Amino acid sequence: MKKRMTSLIAAGAITALALTGCSSSGTGTEPGADSQTGDKTDITIAVFNGWDEGIAVSELWKAILTEQGYDVTLEYADPAPVFVGLSEGDYDATFDVWLPETHASYLEEYGDKIADLGAWNNESKLTLAVNEDAPIDSLAELAEHADEFGNRIIGIEPGAGLTKATEERVIPGYGLEGMEYMTSSTAAMLTELETAIANGENIVVTLWEPHWAYGAFPIRNLEDPEGTLATVESIHTYGKAGFADDFPQVAEWLADFEMDLDTLYSLEKAMFVDYDGSDFGPIVEQWIADNQEYVDSLTS
């Protein structure tokens, strides 16, 4: 698992991963456009650093689209630059926009300059999680037992929607102002989580479902009786303005794209739990072979 943490951090530093497929152009289409579909064949997908469900789905669609003849580039960045890049047309699409709350502030700023291409999962939620043998079951108990958790809550990136929700709703909602709320990165949070569990220590972290950590570590969510994180969210694909004009066939596929939690967890487990590297291509290809009927349905 230590190697996995190193790989996750390394993934955040990658600026571009490209796969080149077979493209075709014909009379009556613009350069770089497929003669059958009218789609441009070069497509750039932005991927949020550390957001593993987005990494997994982006790698899956990179493989699918490459097989269909597109030239696919994945570019990693934090959420804020991704939304800016989409609004300016530097990226074509991203798969990890959470609504109605997590990325609401970005949609308020950039929503009229980007396009919602559809929700692919409607079962997601934000959480605070603890080690399975922690002495509490509820966020309502955390303030009283803060010392048993080192008086710390371990968070992720400062600009994340989960960070904002924790700061604005969870902490004041449960009187946790006396605890230190530490934010840095998802990779750092996962390292802290792994270390605490290995040492038999209590820890509370901000997390979300779906996430491979639930299959990799003995953890559980704290109950949230005040409903500070109660909203079930949808994960959407967003594209630049005019995405459907440049990629009409891909837009049609993405509008119909759905992936339930069991299927997503299966892909995440193959990529992040059973495998310790960062070259996901062969892992995704094997997962596709094992789930061929489902994958074929995404472009049928």
Image (tube, rainbow, N blue to C red):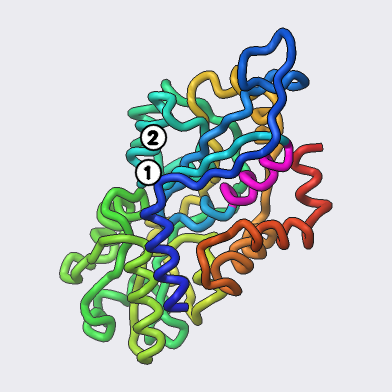
Name the disc covering residue 55, or none: none
Q: Secondary structure at mark 1?
A: helix
58 magenta-colored: yes
User: On the rendered structure, is 149 left or right of 64?
Assistant: left
Q: Secondary structure at mark 2?
A: helix
User: On the rendered structure, is 238 left or right of 288?
Assistant: left
Answer with the quarter of the image where residue 16 lies.
Answer: top left
Q: Say which residue appears at 53% left-offset and 76% top-offset.
A: 216
Q: Say which residue appears at 70% left-offset and 20% top-offset.
A: 25
Instruction: Tell me where residue 277 appears, x and y as whole percent.
Output: 52, 68
Answer with the quarter of the image where residue 281 lies.
Answer: bottom right
Q: Say which residue appears at 36% left-offset and 54% top-offset.
A: 13
Instruction: Tell me where residue 127 appears, x and y as whole percent.
Output: 43, 63
User: On the rendered structure, is 6 left or right of 151?
Assistant: right
Disc 1 and disc 2 in contact, CB within 8 angstroms: yes
Instruction: Tell me where residue 262 appears, x and y as whole percent.
Output: 68, 62
Circle 1 residue: 79
Amino acid found under the numbered disc labelled 1: Pro
Amino acid found under the numbered disc labelled 2: Phe
Name the disc covering residue 83, or none: 2
User: What span is in magenta?
Assistant: 57-68
Frontmost residue, 186 versus 36: 36
Instruction: Tell me where residue 236 appears, x and y as whole percent.
Output: 55, 40
Q: Residue furthest bottom?
A: 200
Quadrant of the frame with the C terminus? top right
